Amino acid sequence: MSTSSQRRLDPCPCGSGRRYKDCHGSLGAAPQHASQRDAAAISRRGHERHDAMDLDGALANFEAAITLDPSFAQAHHNRGLTADARRLCARLAGIGVAHANAGHCIRG
């Protein structure tokens, strides 16, 4: 995470709801292992959102996890799967086809 692109009073990109300066932008830099733990927690929230078919929210979580830990392979993988699911749902909704996969896109 680069402090040059993130302003200290902006919301933290990790999704915690705290200001950047009070979270990952604190002047005493967090150790690397803390960022990895945070990235894993955010990625788990992405899984929950994906399961609830909140695909936009899931993408945001996976991207935040990647921002915190660019080497987090599972977050990269899940981001790709979620982006594919979002494209599939958009295509099925646009066609209006009753299809076995449509149930995956439309729950309720």
Image (cartoon, grey):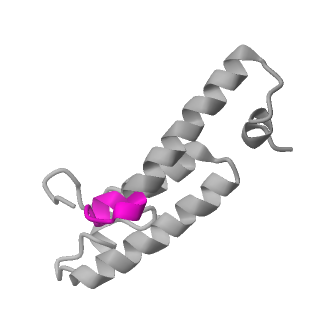
Instruction: Confirm whether residue 12 shows in the render.
Output: no
On screen, residue 49 versus residue 38, left or right, reads right
Image coordinates of residue 86 in percent, x first then y, are 57, 36
Above/below status of 41 relative to 30: above
Task: Tell me what residue is drawn at x 80 percent, y 34 percent.
Answer: 100
Task: Tell me what residue is drawn at x 23 percent, y 80 percent.
Answer: 32
Image coordinates of residue 26 in percent, x first then y, are 23, 76
Image coordinates of residue 76 in percent, x first then y, are 37, 54
Task: Tell me what residue is drawn at x 68 percent, y 17 percent.
Answer: 94
Nearest to the observer: residue 19 or residue 60: 60
Residue extending farthest to the front is: 100
> What secondary structure do most residues of the magenta stretch adopt?
helix
Instruction: Confirm whether residue 7 shows in the render.
Output: yes
Above/below status of 84 relative to 8: above
Residue extending farthest to the left is: 4
Q: Is residue 96 magenta?
A: no
Nearest to the observer: residue 86 or residue 101: 101
Locate residue 68: give its quadrant: bottom left
Residue extending farthest to the right is: 108
On screen, residue 92 versus residue 7, left or right, reads right
Task: Tell me what residue is drawn at x 32 percent, y 56 percent.
Answer: 10
Quarter of the image for the N terminus: give it. bottom left
Image coordinates of residue 101 in percent, x first then y, are 74, 36
Segment colored magenta: 65-75
Above/below status of 16 relative to 87: below
